[in-house]
Image (cartoon, rainbow, N blue to C red):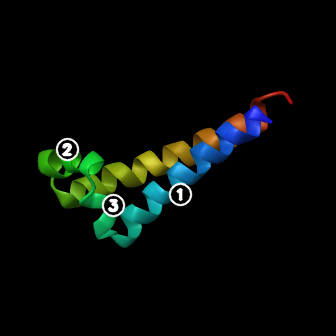
Amino acid sequence: MAKYFMIIIFAIAGLISALASIFNWDWFFTAQNAQYAVKRFGRQKSRLIYGLLGLALMMMAAYFYLNTPA
């Protein structure tokens, strides 16, 4: 059960990050946690970084799902 909980957390976090990057969600990039990246790299590069991060998280979820014994 804990296996699936962690996989779902990774998948949801990755999906939200990727969708925020694609759709340029203002609420995501004005949140306090994202402000460091936006101030340091600018909005467009931050979108790229968060898009890649989202993709990586979704790939990790798929990897853990396929390679972790029940």
Q: CA distance from mark 3 to mark 2?
A: 12 Å
Along the horizontal axis of the image, is 57 left or right of 7? left
Q: Residues within 10 Å of mark 3 (few under 14, many from 20)?
A: some
Q: Which residue is mark 2?
A: 36
The residue at 33%/60% (across/down) is 28
Type of the residue with mark 2:
Tyr
Furthest residue toward right: 70
Task: In this rendered view, identify the residue nearer to me: 28 or 46.
Answer: 28
The secondary structure type at the circle numbered 2 is helix
Q: Tell me the number on the disc at residue 4.
A: none
Type of the residue with mark 1:
Leu
The residue at 20%/59% (across/down) is 43
The residue at 19%/44% (across/down) is 36
Q: CA distance from mark 1 to mark 3?
A: 13 Å
Along the horizontal axis of the image, is 20 left or right of 61? left
Q: Quadrant of the C terminus?
A: top right
Q: Quadrant of the N terminus?
A: top right
Along the horizontal axis of the image, is 56 left or right of 27? right
Q: Residues within 10 Å of mark 1 (few under 14, many from 20)?
A: some
Q: Is residue 70 above or below residue 51?
A: above
Asked which quadrant contains residue 51, the reply is bottom left
Q: Is residue 27 above or below residue 56?
A: below
Q: Position of residue 30 (x, y in %)?
A: 24, 60
The residue at 84%/27% (across/down) is 69
Q: Are marks 3 and 2 in contact (CB under 8 Å)?
A: no
Q: Residues within 10 Å of mark 2 (few under 14, many from 20)?
A: some
Asked which quadrant contains residue 5, the reply is top right
Furthest residue toward bottom: 23
Q: Tell me the number on the disc at residue 15.
A: 1
Tell which circle, 1 or 3, labels the residue nearer the N-terminal end.
Answer: 1
Front label number (1 vs 3):
3
Q: Which residue is mark 3?
A: 28
